[in-house]
Amino acid sequence: MNKIYPRLVVPLIMVGIFSCQSIKKSSKFGLTEGYYTAKRKGGDAVPVYLFPDEDSIKVYRKQSPHFNATDSTGSLFIAFPGVVRAVKPQDYFLKQGTFDIDILSILFKYRPAISGFPNQLNTSILNGALFLGYRTDLYKINYNETPFGAYRRSVTHYGFSFGVFTGLGASRIDPSQGALSIEYDGLVNPSGLAAILAVDKFTFGLTYGVDHLIDKNHRFWIYQGKPWIGLGVGLNLN
């Protein structure tokens, strides 16, 4: 079974390297060009295509099935300039669903009591995983009044993801955790399910997973394949 893990590690490293090249281009906490649904309070959701430029966020109505995002002449739905000097515009909500790729660092693990060993709260920064899931991003566009009587645009962002993760980490292995005579930091493969919440640039998640020790002592380790609950922070890659 241990031969499986080298095959797992290499793809994780390669995906991480190539994905990191796009971090600077990625900005899920900010509005980027693409398809959304737009809705104001009391109104219906409208499929749209959003195009932000330096001065304004332009929203074009998606006229299915003949909508062409590169030729939106005459289909402008609404525009959100950076500053409005007249009447305050209505608040709008934009929603977008996408496939999600994150790097997830698991900061805390709670392990239930097992084999006479008490429950534990393990902390380690040496736990990294690749997360894959489906993400929903919600944006609220509103205008706040300035001291000079104008209204300045503001965008608030929330994101929700649910999916699976797998990666590599370290765990303390000692004689009290099985039929072992040595003490060392073992290499483990954490994997499981995660629910992630993003508020603007900050991303954190609740994880449910298991660890597999990647060496010959895995059959003696009492936590091998046993579930834990954790808290992690994430970095979006796409």
Image (cartoon, helix red, strand yellow):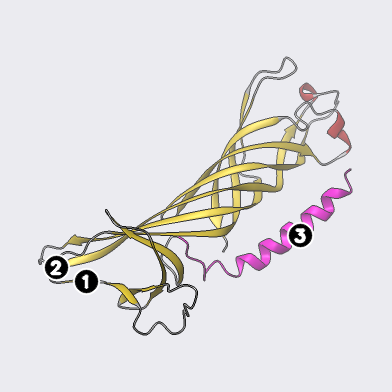
Name the main secondary structure of what is drawn in magenta.
Answer: helix
Three-letter residue code for mark 2: Ala
Secondary structure, mark 2, is loop
- Provide the residue span drawn in magenta: 1-28
**Residue wearing tag 1:** 83
Q: Residue at the location (44% across, 69% down)?
A: 32
**Residue wearing tag 2:** 150
Three-letter residue code for mark 3: Pro
The vertical placement of 174 against 134, above or below, is: above
Query: Which residue occupies the extreme top position in the image?
Result: 116
Choose the circle earlier in sequence order: 1 or 2. 1
Tell me where residue 46 appears, x and y as whole percent: 38, 64
Could you say which is closer to the camera, residue 16 or residue 216? Answer: 16
Three-letter residue code for mark 1: Val
Q: Is residue 21 magenta?
A: yes
Q: Quadrant of residue 217?
A: top right
Q: Residue at the location (63% across, 42% down)?
A: 193
Contact (Cβ within 8 Å) of mark 3 with mark 1: no
Choose the circle earlier in sequence order: 2 or 3. 3
Choose the circle earlier in sequence order: 3 or 1. 3
Contact (Cβ within 8 Å) of mark 1 with mark 2: yes
**Residue wearing tag 3:** 11
